[in-house]
Amino acid sequence: MKKTAILAAALSAAVTLPATAQEVTLGLGYSDYHREIAEDGAQFAIEYLHNPFFEKGRLSARFGATLEAQETGDVFAGVGISSVVDLNNDWFIETSVMPGAYSESSAGNDLGSAFEIRSLFAVGKRFDNGKAVSLAFSHKSNASTADENPGVNSLTLRWHIPLGR
């Protein structure tokens, strides 16, 4: 009975959160692998960012998930936390850390393990309709949890689309 009451309270709180805080981002960019034998290439990314679970002043934090695919066939899927700092004139800074699973298309694009962590830093501008554009720099590596840790950097232009508007 207690679990049911806690679940009902959590669902009720989730329903009252503003739906416009959720968003999907679509990104197109380029990835540069650290190994000389790697195949660099274009990247497509889609990310879902949930309602903030923390908001104080200009800072908010929320859970998110990402799926990234390289033209070479490499794929990364991760979940984690994203934070946004709102600046003046609708500009913002976004950071995220998303651990996840990575699958390489060739031995040259092996990042050392299936477990990788994507960190991201982006600067963006929000428009009057709620949509936004950002330029993001991201890095994926296994944080030295494996014997090899070559890593990959990506530069991505992202389009943010609010959900529920």
Image (tube, grey):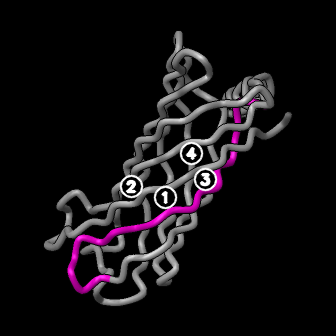
Q: Are marks 3 and 4 in contact (CB under 8 Å)?
A: yes
| Separation (CA) of disc 3 from disc 4 | 7 Å
- State which tag comes first along the sequence, 4 or 2: 4
Q: What are the residue bounds of the magenta stretch?
A: 20-38
Foreground mark, 3 or 4? 3
| Disc 1/disc 2 C-alpha distance (Å) | 8 Å
Residue that label 3 marks: 47
Q: Give me the disc on residue 78.
A: 1
Image location of residue 140, percent across then percent down? 34, 60
Relative to 108, 118 lies left or right = right
Q: Is residue 64 above or below residue 4?
A: below
On residue 64, the disc is: 4
Q: Amino acid at mark 1?
A: Gly
Which amino acid is tagged 2?
Arg
Answer above or below: position of 105 versus 135.
below
Q: Element at badge 4?
A: strand
The residue tagged with tag 3: helix, strand or loop? strand
Q: Position of residue 130 (x, y in %)?
A: 75, 31
Q: What amino acid is labelled 4 in the image?
A: Gly
Residue at the far left: name it.
147
Q: Which residue is mark 2?
A: 118
Does the magenta-highlighted stretch encompass residue 18? no
